[in-house]
Image: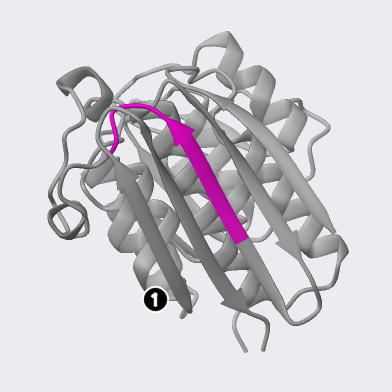
Amino acid sequence: MQLKFQVQGMDFSRAGQAATKIKKALQLAGMDPATTRKAIIIAYEAEMNIVIHACHGSLTANITPRKVEIIADDEGPGIPDISLAMQEGYSTAPPHIREMGFGAGMGLPNIKKSADELDIRSEVNKGTRLWAVVFNN
Amino acid sequence: MVKLIDWQEIIAELELTAHHHKALALPPVYGAYCGDMMSDVLARARRGSLWITIQRHRNVIAVASLVGLSGVVISGGRVPPPDTVDLAEREGVPLFSTPLDSFHAAGRLYNLLIRRGKC
């Protein structure tokens, strides 16, 4: 099963909707609760990264009985230094975003902790592609 | 045997005002989590916990729903805006506010939970 959602930068009114729909699909598919939790952490953080940092993008979930694959593709500023962005606490989010409880520099570290496999490719001033897999135990 | 906490007891002790629909069935509360950063709550809060936070925008409901929390308590006398209340109703997430700050709300809830052997 494939679910694909368009995500608009700075659209906080719809932020989290894609991850919520992915969660419902995973529950309906009978995925293990631990797999579901990891997958929704990845989906939500990836969705919020597009909302906070990118112009627009898409969030895709490929669900099979064996694994959940999450792909976040965006057009935006890109990540100049991915290893720096993976460090907990590092954030480029502006103050008004942080006041809402986002941009704590936990997004990518949360994704890394939850993913069994992870690949992030980014080009400055073009965009970022995040690919993550959680295996269903 | 662990006894469930009566919601009426939680509502009285934490001085809660409900903002969700009266007909909403309140799920059992097994614990609590205090935090204002979405990523922190998403990663660390446990399913069935009551979330105490100063945040009141609608993304709080998205996070609460994703984690499977028992409800949200907005602290410090802050009141949720209408779009947060609407989303809470749609997602079936119990939504409350309290005049207590997060520390005192959490302290009172901790005492209730510990009396029931839940902490």
Q: Give percent across and percent down for residue B62.
A: 57, 38
Q: In the picture, residue A7 is in which quadrant?
A: top right
Question: At 52% across and 46% down in the image, what residue appears?
Answer: A72
Point out residue A93 in the picture as x, y percentages from the top left corner.
21, 30
Q: Nearer the viewer, residue A92 or B57?
A: A92
Q: In this orientation, which residue lies closer to the viewer: B72 or A131?
A: A131
Image quadrant in which you'd find residue A136: bottom right
What's the residue at 47%, 76% (across, down)? A117
Q: Secondary structure at mark 1?
A: loop
Q: Which residues are magenta?
A: A70-78
The image's colour scheme reads one colour
Question: Is residue B73 toward the left or the right of residue A92 in the image?
Answer: right
Q: From what the image shows, is residue B43 above or below residue A102?
A: below
Q: Chain of mark 1?
A: B
- Three-letter amino acid code at the position of disc 1: Cys
Q: Quadrant of the N terminus of chain A?
A: bottom right
Viewer-side residue, A41 vs B43: A41
Figure quadrant of residue B87: top right
User: Seen in the image, is A30 located left or right of residue A128?
Assistant: right
Q: Is residue A46 above or below residue A100?
A: below
Asked if residue B70 shows in the view, the reply is no
Residue for point 69% across, 76% down? A67
Q: Where residue A128 sits in the image (x, y, percent)?
A: 39, 42
The residue under the point 51% across, 65% down is A132
Residue A28 appears in view: yes
Which residue in the protein does label 1 denote? B119
B31 in the magenta segment: no
- Counting every numbered tag in the picture gives 1
Return the x and y of residue A85 as percentages of the image width and height. Answer: 19, 51
Q: Residue placed farthest to the top in the image?
A: B82
At label 1, counting other C-alpha atoms closer than 10 Å, the crowd grade (few under 14, some 14-19, many 20 or more) is few
